[in-house]
């Protein structure tokens, strides 16, 4: 060291407690060491370069830091002269990292080490770090502003490999920008799946090149009489990529054989004799439409539709709906589900359907999504299928908070924020073992909502609780502790301009 170069000064950090950081979802283990890492203009991010996806995670972190506190932090730039502190995102083969989404943090005075096996794990870890960065800097510790991050170790992994939300873009259409905004918030709370309900009686929302009338005719309506809309294939692919950049898988759903009025209106040969005659529908009724399960042409049509959508969907799943086919004869329904399952598999996707599909002899590789009475899901689980837990009484984001809630329905009851949180998917459905559960999903049906502000009013804050139910171990699910951490989400929600229902059950940390 040159004689007149001053020695690095010790920074006198205030005492910190990593264990009390308001992280959601709560990590498996946090071991505080009482000191801190000072994020400042002399900090740089480095990542493993063995996998280019790790560098992308580093870029995501850098962009998030810039957005949150306005600080520029370089990624994998080695010429940084004044570099004093570093954040290293490391691809690690450590056997402590059990699942692909596991991660570990070692936060020390001069370095933050984030270990993960996969870029998805690193990305989940980065969300934890985003939550640890304070909104305001401490300007007295050194001669430049410093954002104080509590030191210690974090060991974390998700409880379930499937943690999702569903958005109904059929009852009301939501634009690409609106869906992206929702994806951003899902990513922040470590969700890994967005299920898009792309078709229903009131509208068909995805361009199918071989059957153009689906959108020419079937997309121009929605509940309440609005103009509807649809995603072109380019727009859908853009959404898939945007989600993938956040390690979120898109699950496309074409709901059938019921909920198909818009499709049958576009192509009348699809219509089933026992169903109501197709016409433009803008009401909220369910259970009156159906495809004709006994016509070969219906299956050629579906082969094209599933082929085109599967071709744009890198994720492993295709959701066939299958709910509320009240006018389809049971034998026709069963025949239909079994035929469509073959088509889905032919296009190399794993079938998901609402729990009614278990009336058919479905393959054990197919997945049933539980939403109402459990008998069908229990039958599916007995036959070896995995189950997605979405009970309407607990996990439906479109249920009103209370009797004076502005938006939403209440056929499954009211779901105040605490009721939405106080249950455990692992034990909620008697008879479904832990091993059978693929994960949890919170659906948002859109009969009563038509833009981001309304979507957010129903989704937030409840979706944040479902993030924790899907990720954190059962021992950590505790409303009293959670509601304190939830209150601390306000700066994030406000910065992102996310509308939320300010329930009186939570003492919100507002200015
Ligand atoms: C039931 S849940 C439905 C939807 C409605 C929703 C409204 C399910 C599989 N089907 O068609 O939009 O209730 O809450």
Image (cartoon, rainbow, N blue to C red):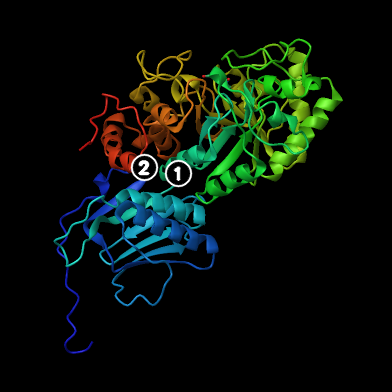
Residue on which the image places disc 2: 496
Circle on res. 222:
none
73 or 413: nearer the eye? 73
The mark closer to the camera, 2 or 1, is 2
Decide if residue 394 is on the left or right side of residue 14.
right
- Foreground of the two, 440 or 224: 224
| Element class at badge 1 | helix
Q: Quick one: label 2 or label 1, which is nearer the N terminus?
A: 1
Q: Position of residue 460 (x, y in %)?
A: 38, 31
Q: Residue furthest front?
A: 227
Q: Residue at x 61, y 43 (%)?
A: 235
- The answer for how far apart the CA atoms under marks 2 and 1 are is 9 Å
Quadrant placement of the N terminus: bottom left
- Furthest residue in direction right, as rendered: 296
Percent across and percent down for residue 202 are 62, 21
Residue 280, quarter of picture: top right
* Location of residue 257 in the rendering, given as x and y in whole percent from the top left corner: 71, 21
Give the labeled residue for mark 1: 184
Q: Position of residue 149 (x, y in %)?
A: 26, 56
- Proximity of marks 2 and 1: CB atoms separated by less than 8 Å: yes
Q: Which quadrant of the frame does ligand 1 lie within?
A: top right
Look at the image and tell me whether residue 97 can be seen.
no
Residue at 34 percent of width and 27 percent of height: 501
Q: Answer above or below: position of 85 versus 195.
A: below
């Amino acid at each position: 060291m040159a004689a007149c170069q001053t020695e690095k000064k010790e920074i006198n950090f205030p005492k910190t407690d990593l264990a009390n950081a308001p992280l959601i979802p709560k990590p498996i283990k946090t071991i505080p060491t009482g000191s801190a890492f000072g994020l400042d203009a002399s900090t740089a991010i480095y990542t493993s370069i063995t996998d280019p996806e790790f560098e992308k995670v580093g870029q995501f972190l850098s962009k998030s830091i810039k957005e949150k506190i306005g600080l520029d932090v370089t990624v994998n730039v080695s010429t940084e002269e004044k570099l004093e502190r570093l954040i290293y995102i490391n691809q690690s083969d450590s056997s402590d990292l059990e699942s692909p989404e596991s991660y570990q943090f070692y936060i020390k005075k001069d370095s933050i080490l984030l270990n993960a096996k996969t870029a998805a794990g690193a990305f989940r870890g980065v969300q934890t770090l985003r939550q640890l960065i304070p909104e305001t800097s401490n300007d007295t510790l050194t001669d430049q502003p410093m954002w104080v991050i509590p030191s210690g170790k974090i060991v974390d992994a998700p409880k379930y490999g499937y943690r999702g939300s569903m958005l109904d873009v059929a009852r009301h259409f939501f634009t690409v920008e609106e869906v992206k905004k929702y994806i951003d918030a899902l990513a922040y709370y470590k969700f890994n799946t967005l299920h898009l309900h792309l078709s229903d009686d009131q509208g068909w929302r995805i361009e199918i090149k071989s059957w153009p009338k689906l959108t020419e005719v079937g997309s121009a309506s929605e509940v309440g009489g609005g103009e509807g809309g649809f995603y072109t294939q380019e727009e859908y692919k853009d959404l898939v990529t945007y989600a993938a950049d956040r390690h979120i898988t898109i699950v496309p759903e074409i709901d059938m054989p019921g909920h198909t009025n818009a499709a049958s209106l576009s192509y009348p040969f699809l219509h089933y004799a026992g169903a109501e005659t197709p016409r433009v529908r803008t009401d909220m009724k369910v259970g009156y439409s159906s495809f004709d399960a006994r016509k070969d042409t219906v299956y050629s049509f579906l082969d094209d539709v599933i082929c085109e959508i599967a071709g744009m969907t890198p994720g492993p799943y295709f959701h066939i709906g299958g709910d509320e086919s009240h006018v389809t004869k049971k034998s026709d329904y069963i025949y239909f589900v079994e035929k469509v399952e073959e088509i889905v598999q032919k296009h190399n996707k794993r079938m998901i359907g609402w729990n009614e599909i278990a009336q058919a002899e479905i393959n054990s590789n197919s997945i049933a999504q539980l939403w109402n009475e459990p008998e069908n899901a229990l039958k599916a689980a007995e036959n070896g299928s995995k189950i997605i837990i979405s009970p309407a009484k607990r996990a439906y984001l479109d249920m009103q908070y209370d009797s004076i809630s502005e938006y939403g329905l209440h056929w499954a009851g009211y779901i105040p924020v605490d009721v939405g949180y106080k249950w455990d998917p692992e034990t909620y459905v008697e008879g479904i073992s832990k091993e059978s559960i693929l994960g949890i999903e919170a659906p948002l049906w859109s009969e009563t909502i038509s833009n981001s502000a309304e979507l957010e009013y129903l989704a937030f804050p409840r979706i944040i609780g479902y993030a924790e139910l899907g990720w954190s171990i059962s021992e950590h699910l505790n409303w009293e502790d959670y509601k304190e951490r939830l209150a601390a989400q306000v700066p994030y929600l406000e910065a992102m301009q996310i509308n939320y229902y300010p329930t009186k059950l939570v003492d919100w940390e507002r200015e």
